[in-house]
Amino acid sequence: MTERNQQRQFYQYGHLVGVLAIMACVLLSSCSQQKVEKVERAFYYWKSNSPLTNKERAVCDTLGVKKLYIKFFEVNFSPERGNFPESKTEWWEGYSNTFTFKEIVPTVYLRNVVFLKSPHEELDILADNINFLITKYANEKFREGTIIQEFQMDCDWTLKSKDNYFYFLTKLKTIAKKQISCTLRLYPFKYPDKMGVPPVDKVTLMCYNLLNPLENPGKNSILDLTELKNYLQDSPTYPLHLDVVLPVYSWAQVYHNERFSEVLYTNYQNLKTNLKQEKPLWYTVLRDTIINETYLRKGDQLKLEEMTAEKIGDAIALLKKNIHFDNNTTVVLFHLDEEQLNQFTNAELASFYSDFSK
């Protein structure tokens, strides 16, 4: 080979490497921010005993929310009763007239003990009973024209309960003849080979309650961005359609004599006027007071875990960078509650949906 030919091949090779490098950069750039073409806006409605307020309806109208995930009831287990429903929603008079939503997704929370204790024969009965109750409530309470095409099951399954839970989901799908979705925590999202992939049509990724609140005193257990990043980075592509849930609530953990007492939901800006901050997240009560029937004594400690628009925006950026969403994705905010929504402007709430398509 002549020297001129060697030089030509060298330059051609160099050009090819450059083109490939540019293509790689473009691909990496496109993967680093996953844009959703169409975002379906939704809320969870988790209250069991009160109608929608005017404020809650107005927020949904303003944001263009036409889809609502409603907790219909919960399922628990006891040796005496077996599997039984509890925390049923109290359907108030004129319930259906308060709803202008196009689609309702009946949601059932199932405690993990149900699938640790129940043989397949009892799970067959459970699937049939759940389908019956959902259908009964839906036919009685929602006006004609409301779309109910999906049932969602909410359960924090474990390795020990996985097989029974997946059996139940398969049975329910056969009986209900509806789309079946289920919630997905971040651990089974990151480790599907270990935790299994549920036999459903789609999953809803729950991006909140990432830590045990009583075991992590220095972190916001509702949404810790470092924890979220650890789950999302280097995670495999999930084999099912992914919707996503973000928290729009805050809470305060109350400690009497350094012992955990209860969780308090309230207007935290008003509450802070009676608190002295001791360190990040932690406050001391300055004088005796009663908040939402909770008696706070002078000297009590509160761990106040708040959600801000900035923190939620940072979480969205992490999700877009690390997850490949389908073109059409439902973004759900947890949950539709006037007192909690007062922490955000309508523009901030709207951005929690629209940022996924930017």
Image (cartoon, rainbow, N blue to C red):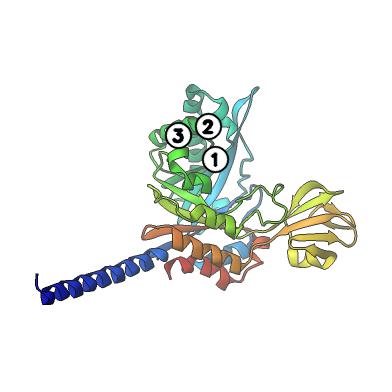
Mark closer to the chain start, 1 or 2: 1
Give the number of the disc on residue 161.
Answer: 2
Which of the numbered marks, if any, corresponds to residue 184?
none
The type of residue carrying mark 1 is: Cys
Q: Residue at x 49, y 44 (%)?
A: 188
Percent coordinates x, y for residue 60 in the rendering? 54, 64
Q: Is residue 185 visible?
A: no
The CA distance from mark 3 to mark 1 is 11 Å
Numbered mark located on residue 166 in the image: 3
Q: Are marks 1 and 2 in contact (CB under 8 Å)?
A: yes
Callout 1 crowding tier (Cα within 10 Å): few <14, some 14–19, many ≥20: many
Query: Which amino acid is tagged 3?
Result: Phe
Q: Which mark is residue 155?
A: 1
List x then y, in percent, for residue 62.
53, 69
Please, which residue is most extreme toward the bottom here? 4
**Would residue 16 be found to the left or right of residue 354 on screen?**
left
Could you say where residue 217 lies in the image, as x and y percent from the top left?
Answer: 73, 53
Instruction: Please tell me whether mark 1 or mark 2 is closer to you in this view.
Output: 2
When asked about the image quadrant of residue 86, the answer is top right
